[in-house]
Amino acid sequence: MHPPDPFRGAAGTGARTDLDLLLNRPGSHGARLDLDVDALAAHLPLLDDCVAMTANGTALISDLGTYAPPSFTGDPLPLVPDAVLLRLHRPSVRAFVAMDADEGRHEPPGLWMFDRLHRVVHRGYLVSHSGTLAMDLLRMARPAAAEEAPAEPADDSSDQLGTLDGLLADATSGADAGVAVEPAQVVDLLCHLCDTGVPLSIGVLNRGCLQLHTGALDLVEHRGNMITMVSGGCNAAFHPADLAEARITRPHGVRGPTSVVRLHAADGRCVAVLAQLGLTTPALATTWEQTISGLVG
């Protein structure tokens, strides 16, 4: 079974987009928000506890918590503990919808994000009453003051953050870079990290949106045809049969060259990343690199 995608096989095959399908879903009620991505980012932390999900048909990540202020490509990446972390590519994320609760589908109220072609990018479901009040504020909000979009620096694949930003702008960026390993070896890596308690950052990409979670793995297991990871309130998963390969690169991080594992689908898209982001202890950084070295032999 694939990660849930409410529009898989429906959008892109006719004139109707994901956005059309959502707004015209029987029994559902929603409204498109008159917001740009900067105005949305300013309001996201007001939503209180949410179940935030990013899924691309091959991998997914779902996290329970409050949104930290999203970061944008070209900006620093603040790793806020115990918060939902999004990194966005401004030109890609373009439309937003506030949905009321759907009793028939057992869905709470939610916020949906779409790309320029009106394909779904990210979903956040509200789990607190205060979040519904914040959603009312979102409905009344207006776009940020019109300004020229800040210039984004050229992506630097030799830098850890530049690597992520390059993938946000183009998920096939650097598809042939680094060392190729089999997806089964990545499963072994995840099981080892779970056994040893070494923290890592898990990220899932979808059309200009990267959702990240950092922490130690509590569980790694096969569930049906999925590899599922649990870390605190976060669940992540991927479908091994949909992966062509994994690639390991060593861009510069806080403590020098730091390995990043990228999971690639058959069409070359990077669908998920495993990394050690932020400032870790020298011991943890060394353990991470030794573990990756064992993976590539």
Image (cartoon, rainbow, N blue to C red):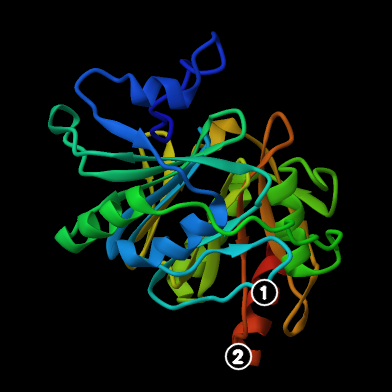
Q: Marks 2/1: CA distance?
A: 20 Å
Q: Residue furthest top?
A: 14
The N terminus lies in which quarter of the figure? top left
Q: Residue 105 falls in which quadrant of the image? A: top left
Disc 1 secondary structure class: loop
Describe residue 72's horizontal placement relative to residue 104 as left or right.
right
Q: Nearer the viewer, residue 194 or 266?
A: 266
Describe residue 19's horizontal placement relative to residue 146 as left or right.
left
* Residue 140 is at least partly visible in this image: yes
Q: Nearer the viewer, residue 184 or 96?
A: 96
Q: Nearer the viewer, residue 24 or 295?
A: 24
Query: Which residue is located at x 51 percent, y 75 percent?
Result: 199
Query: Which residue is located at x 53 percent, y 37 percent?
Result: 56
Q: Upstream in the sequence, badge 2 or badge 1?
A: 1
Q: Residue 251 falls in which quadrant of the image? A: bottom right
Q: Position of residue 154 (x, y in %)?
A: 86, 59
Query: Which residue is located at x 30 percent, y 20 percent?
Result: 25
Crowd band around label 1 with a 10 angstrom C-alpha radius: few (<14), some (14–19), many (20+)? few
Residue kind at label 1, given as amino acid type: Pro
Q: Residue furthest front?
A: 145
Q: Nearer the viewer, residue 239 or 166?
A: 166
Mark 2 or mark 1, whichever is nearer to me? 1
Residue labelled with disc 2 = 281
Residue kind at label 2, given as amino acid type: Thr
Q: Is residue 273 above or below residue 42?
A: above
Crowd band around label 2 with a 10 angstrom C-alpha radius: few (<14), some (14–19), many (20+)? few
Q: Residue furthest bottom?
A: 282
Of the numbered discs in the image, which one, if any, rests on residue 124?
Answer: none
Residue labelled with disc 1 = 76
Q: Is residue 98 above or below residue 137?
A: above
Q: Position of residue 20 (x, y in %)?
A: 43, 21
Describe residue 144's horizontal placement relative to residue 249 as left or right.
left
